[in-house]
Amino acid sequence: MEPGLKTLFSLIESYGDDLNISEEELYLAKEKGYIFDYPKYESHSDTLKKIPLIISQIDPKDIANAFLFSLSKRRLEYRSALGSYYYAKAVPEHDVLKSRNEELAAKFDDCYFCRWQSWKKKTDQHKDILNIYSYRRYKNGGSAVGSVEIQYALFDLEQFIKLPKVTPTDEDIHIFKQILSCVKRLNGSDKAGKLRDMIIKSRIFKTNKDQVSVLLGELGICGILAGEEYPSYDVRFANEYERDPGEYRNDFAYPVNRWHARDGINMQKLKEVFGDDFAIDLK
């Protein structure tokens, strides 16, 4: 592991404990783009204005290539942008939707529609927020398992455009086809957890439980693993209250947390995201 990345992992995984990280190590990690200072405050409206600007700088083909490239190389920072891109692209214009909890609504300006957070009022709690985001990119290839945050998506895409463009190999494409082929081996009532377990058990590629959970979440966000009742965000943008699967033991991101094997693979979305030539016969 590269020294700067190791410093990031030590910073986050030892959070709250005494850290033995030198100023030189922190400086190097910042120079390499792994560790960041406390973010500048941006209002909800300013954050939304950034979305079309960052989206306009990205070719969706590069997003697809990066995701595929990450599979055999295990370069997880390339994988993360798939979910972030299609989440950010789908966010409509909106006003802040405050918490239904009156106490929280009075204390914070957080938006429960796009999950924008008012860092200005939570300085101590969020002093390492960008470092947490950076850690998520390199550790699991995406945002934390569960809901998606607009500020993570924007940060992720800002970092993505700094990466060299990549081209997936035949091995990458083969791995992805194997991942998707696991769907047809499930029972119709099976959910994302069963799919994750089958992918891991099949030893298709080097990975772990959390990384597959995030990967499946990203395939749901872009609509490939999403059913008609609970579609991808570009079809119907669900706010945070609507993303809860209603089950205690389901920590996948929406909408794959509502997906069943009988919903199958949305082939139209698969072609839209990965290209017309990416056709898989899973009937």
Image (spheres, grey):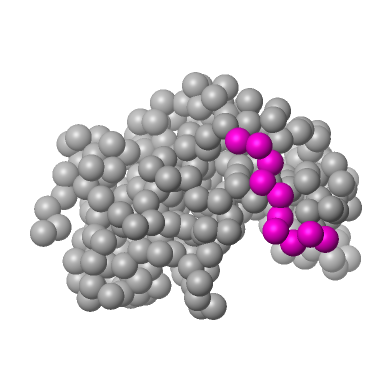
Q: Is residue 100 covered in magenta?
A: yes
Nearer to me, 32 or 174: 174
Q: Which residue is located at x 27 percent, y 44 percent?
A: 270
Q: Is residue 86 visible?
A: yes
Residue 216 appears at what percent x and percent y? 40, 58
Q: Point out the image quarter for the C terminus.
A: bottom left
Where is residue 153, by image quadrant? top right
Q: Which residue is located at x 82 percent, y 61 percent?
A: 103
Residue 166 appears at what percent x and percent y? 40, 33
In the image, residue 245 sits, relative to residue 177, either above or below, namely below
Does residue 55 appear to the left or right of 20 in the view shown?
left
Nearer to me, 109 or 80: 109
Residue 73 appears at what percent x and percent y? 41, 49
Q: Is residue 66 visible?
A: no
In the image, residue 132 sits, relative to residue 31, either above or below, namely below
Q: Is residue 270 covered in magenta?
A: no
Q: Which residue is located at x 69 percent, y 30 percent?
A: 45
- Could you tell me how many numbered marks the image carries? 0
Residue 88 appears at what percent x and percent y? 52, 37
Q: Give the dominant element type of the magenta stretch: helix, strand or loop.
A: loop
Magenta stretch bounds: 94-103
Nearer to me, 209 or 9: 209
Q: Which residue is located at x 25 percent, y 55 percent?
A: 265
Nearer to me, 109 or 252: 109
